[in-house]
Image (cartoon, grey):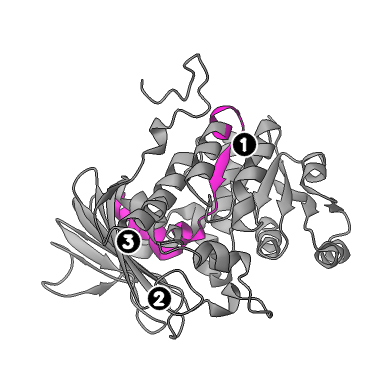
Amino acid sequence: MADIVRFGIAGLRRGASFVSALARVPRAELVAAFDPSPEAGASLRDAHPRVRIAGDFAELLDSGVDAVYLASPQQHHVPQAAAALRRGVHVLSEIPPVAGIEQAHDLVAACRQSDAYYMMAENHCYFPHHLAVEAMVRDGLFGDLYYAEGEYLYEARHKLRGPDGRPTWQGEWHAGRNAVTYPTHTLGPLLRWMDTRLVAVAAAGAGREPGFAVDSTMVLLGRTAGHALVTMRQDLISYRPREAAYLAVQGSNGAFESGRGPFDRPRVHIRGRSAEREWEPLEAYAETFLPGRYRELAADESLWKTPYGPTLDFVEGILSGSPPPLGVYAALDTMLPGIASEGSAAAGGAWVDVPDPRFFTDGIGVTPGREWPLT
């Protein structure tokens, strides 16, 4: 197996953060890039003259790459991922991973028919305090988790309409239907900590402005296979300051809250360790529980908004042969509840089932193989 992973990038707007992050990932290098904007390609070439600028995505795949990072608009993620996987090229995809249920089926089929890796680049799973909480959950400090909640409150009007007033691709996909359209920043970490998926959701919204199909605030209530509850609020429209994504969990032995806003700090309460009915700062546990391989994330907060953390694990998985931590099923577990929420909101908040992508039959063929879901 090669000792270095050669990357190509599709999409240089979000991809710019990947260029800086990749430079800090061991055993990885950038060799090619594609963006439909000639100016974006020229700018990258000026800064990195050894990187090949491809004229289209097919040429990017022909550029000697082992893996591609998909930072293109959301609706292109699955078609580009499928094309790469068919060529045996590993895929690290930005979020959201799919643009609808049909694409979810297509992605499962492409992954099953390829020996290449697929991973979702959800950087919120790699915030240092989230990584420390994950380790504490695995160590049993919070006991059995039975409730989790999160908020993604980000007034994104500037991204939803172009200068001519027409919807951008973000406006089409994030505000073009009444659903929880951007769930992965919240459900990504929460479902990873709880080691489960949502089997049913109920959703409702409040507030509606002309020109937007999505309610100003959408709230989703989810039930896991183990009968735990998960709630999340998405707000992309309301006038408000941007806040850090809020996450919280409650277990049989304690609780975690990430804090709301820039002046609120992450905190925990753990029975038998914390003072009775008192919070203590998560920092008291971070040194012990933050895995050593992610120390650079803790030392440099600028890395949080980049795909550095996911890329670190993606490259390690390719080189070691270990499974990617946010593979196709984990990726779809974070997105399918949002897709299902549209039906619930249309039905007045009724509970609707969330499909399990492990039981999609796409890509199996007539002979059961390594991804046969019913064995």
Residue 86 at what x, y percent from top left? Answer: 67, 32
- Residue 278, disc: none
Residue placed most toward the observer, 370 or 258: 370
Around disc 1, counting alpha carbons within 10 Å, would you say few (fewer than 14), some (14 to 19), or many (20 or more)?
Answer: some
Q: Are marks 1 and 2 in contact (CB under 8 Å)?
A: no
Residue 164 at what x, y percent from top left? Answer: 68, 79
- Residue 345, disc: 3
Residue placed most toward the observer, 120 or 354: 354
Residue placed most toward the observer, 57 or 259: 57
Inspect the image, locate mark 1, and give the three-letter code of the amino acid beneath it. Answer: Leu
Q: Which residue is mark 1?
A: 319
Q: Are marks 3 and 2 in contact (CB under 8 Å)?
A: no
Residue occupying the point 21% across, 74% down: 279
On the picture, is 118 further left or further right than 131? Answer: right
Residue occupying the point 87% across, 64% down: 42
Disc nearer the start of the sequence (1/2): 2
Q: CA distance from mark 3 to mark 1?
A: 44 Å
Disc nearer the start of the sequence (3/2): 2
Can residue 148 be seen at all in this image of the molecule?
Answer: yes
Is residue 114 inside the magenta stretch?
Answer: yes
Can residue 26 be seen at all in this image of the molecule?
Answer: no
Mark whose residue sits in front, 3 or 1:
3
Q: Which residue is mark 2?
A: 216
The span shown in magenta is 110-139
Inspect the image, locate mark 2, and give the three-letter code of the amino acid beneath it. Answer: Ser
Residue furthest left as drawn = 276
Disc nearer the start of the sequence (3/1): 1
Relative to 100, say whether 322 is above or below.
above
Residue 237 at what x, y percent from top left? Answer: 46, 78
SS state under label 1: helix
